[in-house]
Image: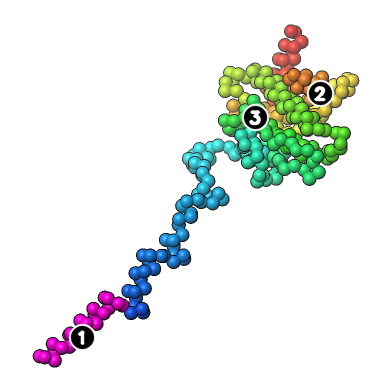
Amino acid sequence: MGASMSMPAAPIVKAEAVMVAPPQGCPMHQEAQPVKVSPPSECPMHQPQPVNVSPPSECPMHQAAPPAAPPAAAAAAPAPPAHQDRAYEFVECPMKAATGMKSDIDPANMMPPPNQTPAPDQPFTLPVTRQESKIPRHGTERNWVYPSEQMFWNAMLRKGWRWREDDLGPQDMSNIIKIHNQNNEQAWQEILKWEALHAQECPCGPSLKRFGGKAKEYSPRARLRHWMGYELPFDRHDWIVDRCGKEVRYVIDYYDGEINKDTYEFSILDVRPAFDSMEAVWDRMKVAWWRWTS
């Protein structure tokens, strides 16, 4: 019995020693201090702090995602023209929108998307701000947007024009843009006069679907006038108008005129529906009769 009583006494003494001063190699001695006092730098719990405080600007979570459209609405809405896809960014924030443009041809107007980058040899800086027109754009709730002065400059370069010191200045480009925009507004007002003949058929009004320039493709009417001694138009456009689901093509011939310095009206326009249908033929016959008898 005495021997059996002395044997448990030794482990009790050793257990006290473990609680008071554990050896350096004991796992209990290594786990308590680093976890509670100073977590290692590679520990995941030590790294979320900078991300939560200041996320990088290029992080997707830092940018507002556009709300997803319902599947039915997305399928029904037509795709906007590439040229007008980011146009309102240049109306609202030109400097922010001037980056990241593509170079595909826009089928709505047969022009590349807006190139807002200055040309390598451009002698002066041009604005990239764009002006909204009053012409409804088909398939959207917005209007068409006119090109900026920088876009117009780049378009002239693509057509072969080259700047010389005595050619154009910044103020000239500003005037050119104003004349261009006014010509288009004037053309749309002429189209609305023709479309007034179909107000009952399309009470919501027409919208412009697409358009294109045909400067060297003179219309039969322009050629006939030229044979009679009149000048040829300096430009021609074909505008495709949506009349509540029906496509109607309009031919617009642009003739030189006297510039109005107050309104920037410059061109004399000859706007009429193309002879694509008997309805268009009848419209032109009626208007010709009214003009003859008025």
Residue that appears at 32% across and 74% down: 28
Vertical order, 96 against 13 (above or below): above
Vertical order, 204 against 113 (above or below): above
Q: Where, by quadrant of the figure, is residue 105 drawn?
A: top right
Spatial CA span between label 2 and label 1? 117 Å
Q: Which residue in the structure is indicated by mark 1?
A: 10
In the displayed structure image, the side of residue 129 where residue 225 appears, left or right: right
Vertical order, 160 against 206 (above or below): below
Foreground residue among 165 and 259: 165
Q: Which comes sooner in the sequence, label 3 or label 1?
A: 1
Q: Which residue in the structure is indicated by mark 2?
A: 255
Foreground residue among 280 and 16: 16
Vertical order, 142 against 38 (above or below): above
Part of the protein shown in magenta:
1-22
Query: In which quadrant will I find the N terminus?
Result: bottom left
Q: Give residue 246's position: percent from left, percent from top.
A: 62, 28
Q: Which residue in the structure is indicated by mark 3?
A: 132
Foreground residue among 130 and 216: 130
